[in-house]
Image: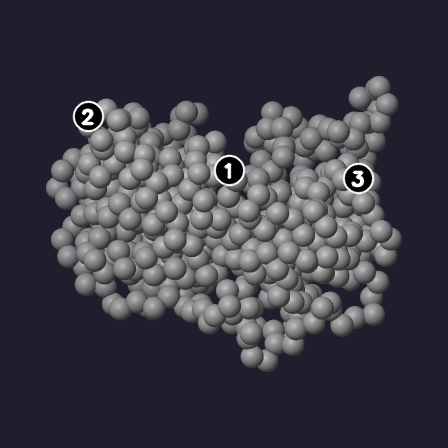
Amino acid sequence: MAQGVEMTGRPATAAPFAIELKGISKAFGPVQANKDINIAVPKGTIHGIIGENGAGKSTLMSILYGFYRADAGEIFIGGRLTPIPDSQSAIRAGIGMVFQHFKLVQNFTVLENVVLGAEEGALLNTSLAKARAELQRLSRDYELDVNPDALIEDLSVGHQQRVEILKALYRQADILILDEPTGVLTPDEADHLFRILKGLRDQGKTVILITHKLREIMEATDNVSVMRRGTMVGTVKTAETSPEALAELMVGRKVLLEVEKKPATPGAVVLDVQNLRVVDEHKVERLKGVSLQIRAGEILGIAGVAGNGQSELLAALGGITKATGAVTLKGEALPLTGKGANGRARREAGIGHIPEDRQALGLIMDFAAWENMAFGYHHRPQYGAGAVLMDNAAVRAETDKQMAAYDVRPPIASLAAKSFSGGNQQKIVVAREIESGPDLLLIGQPTRGVDIGAIEFIHKQIVALRDAGKAILLVSVELDEIMSLSDRILVMFDGQVMGERDPEITNERELGLLMAGMTG
């Protein structure tokens, strides 16, 4: 146990409890997701729940929201025993939940999404008129400024998240659960979200924040409960703990919160990009003549607010998106047609790719972990059993090996990818791409949704790949990750490179100005 952290069964406070969970247990076959969990959350507080991927955080909250039924235990809301067999029961009990992956109809308006499922009577116009007035009040009271007539598909991710919060508040939620809410947000959007949550707390709402980011816990919460391998380690007041102590409680050992790496010794140019341009389907130029080089044995970090061309850069270099310009890998020109065969050609040329969106581009969610571990590399000799057939046993054996090395939980290769938590899905993709031994690794958001122990491990693997003489292109919205891992930093704004900086002598303020398009 971390030194200097007093563990208690529940926070030392006289405030009435909004939620009490007593003796909650839940198993999925042989996997014990929750084991005899006890937690008490005071009313009108922001309560953090942290733990490694697979610790049971999301399962516990899914029980509270009625998605799962506990095998044992009781739920008390406002001091009253409250059975919650389904999500409608949770809503009636005043509980709302904002999921990691939003539950919105993309071609509906904000107003229509808020009303959906909560209509009153047969006349939809009456419900919409009432909802419009209520939305205006909620937006004003909680700084949730969203146009009720905007289509969801036209909103930024941050504004879509506000719609999810509005949906819960419209249904009169007094308790709001947020599952990894900043995983898809820019730093500015995350800061705005925390202001919203503090405003909700100050008006008497109770917020449960599930996150793996210690900075967010320290900044936003009043109390924090720590889970490890399905059990509750304990609860502490946030003001009385530290990131280092919480990290140790989460993983059961001391964790390095800083990246340890020696100075880079760059070699020959591996990737050369000249005047790369991408025009999207709406004829909007997303990349405007980007040029860069990456040498063997170095990490080039790309900093920038999401939506400024970083995703298009990765997609073009990965062979997914059509582009113009010139790209060479070890002196050989790469096609920029964006056709499907380009992906295989790039892997065979020595390019690995950890995509920004693991579910859309990194995994097939209904397929097993062992099948996903082979995708893109199933033509390799070690997986072959003749000219046509794949050696499934060899793939399974390699998957077992990598699941153990990367601590994928549960370590069951036959489970479908959708059965793993987001962080464990990410570990599968990271393991597949890093262990392929590429000459160039393209990385988009490598630790999105990943716990502190796994972040440390993934960072070490990236640095080890660099030290083995590989070239790495790193895109991340986590500025501290860019500054810690990169040997050089390029800042992008509006599809262009605004400048290059040395991470040893720059700072967040200088990078922030470049990210905002200010070069003076």
Could you tell me how far apart the alpha carbons at marks 1 and 3 are, in whole angstroms? 26 Å
Residue drawn at x 78%, y 52% is 74
What amino acid type is highlighted by mark number 2? Answer: Ala
Left or right: residue 479 versus residue 8 is: left
Q: Mark 1 = which residue?
A: 418
Q: Which residue is at the front of the view, 411 or 75?
A: 411
Left or right: residue 167 versus residue 315 is: right
Tag shown at residue 387: 2
Q: Which residue is at the front of the view, 452 or 80?
A: 80
| Label 3 CA crowd tier, 10 Å (few <14, some 14–19, many 20+) | some
Decide which of tag 1 and tag 3 comes sooner along the chain: 3
- Give residue 466's position: percent from left, percent from top: 25, 57
**SS label for mark 1:** helix
Tell me how the rendering is colored.
one colour
What amino acid type is highlighted by mark number 3? Answer: Ser
Decide which of tag 3 and tag 2 comes sooner along the chain: 3
Q: Which residue is at the front of the view, 387 or 289?
A: 387
